[in-house]
Amino acid sequence: LPEYAFIGRSNVGKSSLINMLTGRKSLAKTSGKPGKTQLINHFLINKNWHLVDLPGYGYARVSKTAKKTFQKFITEYFSKRLQMVCAFVLVDIRHKPQNIDLDFMQWLGENGIPFCIIFTKADKLKPMAIEKHVEDYKTILLETWEDMPNYFITSSSKSIGKDDVLHYIDELNNSVNT
Ligand code: GDP
């Protein structure tokens, strides 16, 4: 089955987003504490695709060894999963573009891994500020990319963006199947 990976910095709102998309509150546990998602979790959605919950990156206080282990883990995941259709990189809409996220997108691009951006926590900003932050991202990404990657603006607490993401995945599933 086609699968879609969800990844982002710890505390970006990944568990909340996955709960919103799956509608299954109990599966991905959210917490204020960073570092809850330790291992890969698979969710079977509509019996026709898998949502893959990858560990968060960018913990401030982990050792170099832990960072290396994480990199190896992620590299192995992406090199082995031929059924992986698209990675969704989550970024907090409130923050200016951060190197850790930009570097990760760069790495995905260099390795030919398709990805989209999911902006999270959109309820925390006014529409004008959202636009400005997205523009900042575009400016930076267009320095290295020919086009802005597809992106989605979401809020798990206000249930924004759910249908957009799910429809996009449905479309990709259809193009994979045909
Ligand atoms: P994870 O570590 O990336 O899985 O992040 P979580 O889903 O556990 O969320 C981290 C924190 O951000 C929690 O305190 C959530 O309540 C909060 N959060 C997550 N999504 C949203 C959102 O859409 N809006 C707001 N206002 N807070 C959110």
Image (spheres, helix red, strand yellow):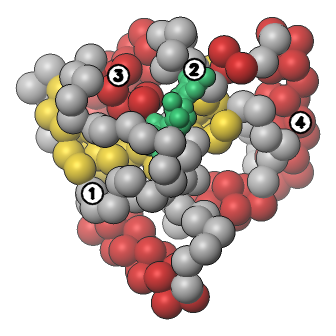
Give how far apart the Cα atoms at labels 3 and 1 are. Answer: 17 Å
Which structural element holds mark 4? helix
> Of marks 4 and 1, which one's residue comes earlier in the chain?
1
Label 1 amino acid?
Ile
Q: Is residue 58 above or below residue 21?
A: below
Percent across and percent down for residue 99 are 77, 61
Which structural element holds mark 2? loop
Q: Is residue 84 above or below residue 43?
A: below
> Of marks 2 and 4, which one's residue comes earlier in the chain?
4
Give how far apart the Cα atoms at labels 2 and 3 are. Answer: 11 Å
Which residue is the site of mark 2?
154
Horizontally, is 86 left or right of 121 in the view? left
Which residue is the site of mark 3?
21
- The residue shown at (37%, 20%) is 20
Q: State the mark number for residue 136.
A: 4
Label 2 amino acid?
Thr
Mark 2 close to ligand 1, CB under 8 Å: yes
Which residue is the site of mark 1?
40
Label 4 amino acid?
Asp
The reply to whether callout 3 and callout 4 are in contact (CB within 8 Å) is: no
Which structural element holds mark 1? loop
- The residue shown at (36%, 31%) is 18
